[in-house]
Image (cartoon, rainbow, N blue to C red):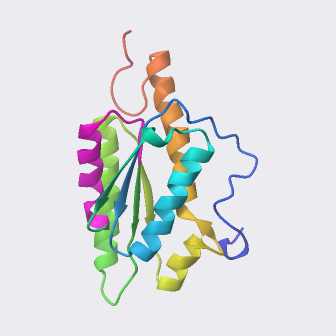
């Protein structure tokens, strides 16, 4: 279904687990704050809606989207987290800068996730126009912050399951506990 016909933030009938036992990080780019602010608020509100405790959500702001991977690393070094939501927005301009930034951020977040074992959710909008960004930051296509929070909850549960069952996700050997 085309995104022009529905809100992409509706989880539908999928079951989202209760998040009360998890700790979350929220790393938010200040660049395009008119976009990232509503996305971060939606992520925060969604975590609370699904049972996360206010004090179990740690937030830091970074200057821009490019700094999200380092922000995730810094936040993770301060407290034990089950998942980190990274919120940013890179609007396509007249040059290819957006491609370089988006690729670098995606690579940085996946590298962080694999090395740390903490899921880093890519809550970065990559629109062609400001209007498209606004449509995905609380406009007619929902809010990417909601989607990122729902993903973080599900990934935290998967991470916990891998600890509890002695299995591993990704590369490496299963835990021998």
Determine the residue located farthest toward the bottom in the rendered image: 94
Residue depicted at x 33% and y 27%: 172
Residue depicted at x 34% and y 34%: 117
Task: Indicate left or right for 55 with 150 as reference.
Answer: left
Determine the residue located farthest toward the top in the rendered image: 177
In which quadrant is the C terminus drawn? top left
Q: Position of residue 134 (x, y in %)?
A: 53, 78
Confirm whether the magenta stretch covers residue 70: yes
Confirm whether the magenta stretch covers residue 22: no
Q: Is residue 126 visible?
A: no
Determine the residue located farthest toward the right in the rendered image: 13
Residue depicted at x 26% and y 67%: 63
Reply above or below: 45 against 77: below
Q: Which residues are magenta?
A: 65-84
Q: Main secondary structure of the magenta part?
A: helix
Reply above or below: 80 against 46: above
| Viewer-nearest residue: 79 or 155 | 79
């Amino acid at each position: 279904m085309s995104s022009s016909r529905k809100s992409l933030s509706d989880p539908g009938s999928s079951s989202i687990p209760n998040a009360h036992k998890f700790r979350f990080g929220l790393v938010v780019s200040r660049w395009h704050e008119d976009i990232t602010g509503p996305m971060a608020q939606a992520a925060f509100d969604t975590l609370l809606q699904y049972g996360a405790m206010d004090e179990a959500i740690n937030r830091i702001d970074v200057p821009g989207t490019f700094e999200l991977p380092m922000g995730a690393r810094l936040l993770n070094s301060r407290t034990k987290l089950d998942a980190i939501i990274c919120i940013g927005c890179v609007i396509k301009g007249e040059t290819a800068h957006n491609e370089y930034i988006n690729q670098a951020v995606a690579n940085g977040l996946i590298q962080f996730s694999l090395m740390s074992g903490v899921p880093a959710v890519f809550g970065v909008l990559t629109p062609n126009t400001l209007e498209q960004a606004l449509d995905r930051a609380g406009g007619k296509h929902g809010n990417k912050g909601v989607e990122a929070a729902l993903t973080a909850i599900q990934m935290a549960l998967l991470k916990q399951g891998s600890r509890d069952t002695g299995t591993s996700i990704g590369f490496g050997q299963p835990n021998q506990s």
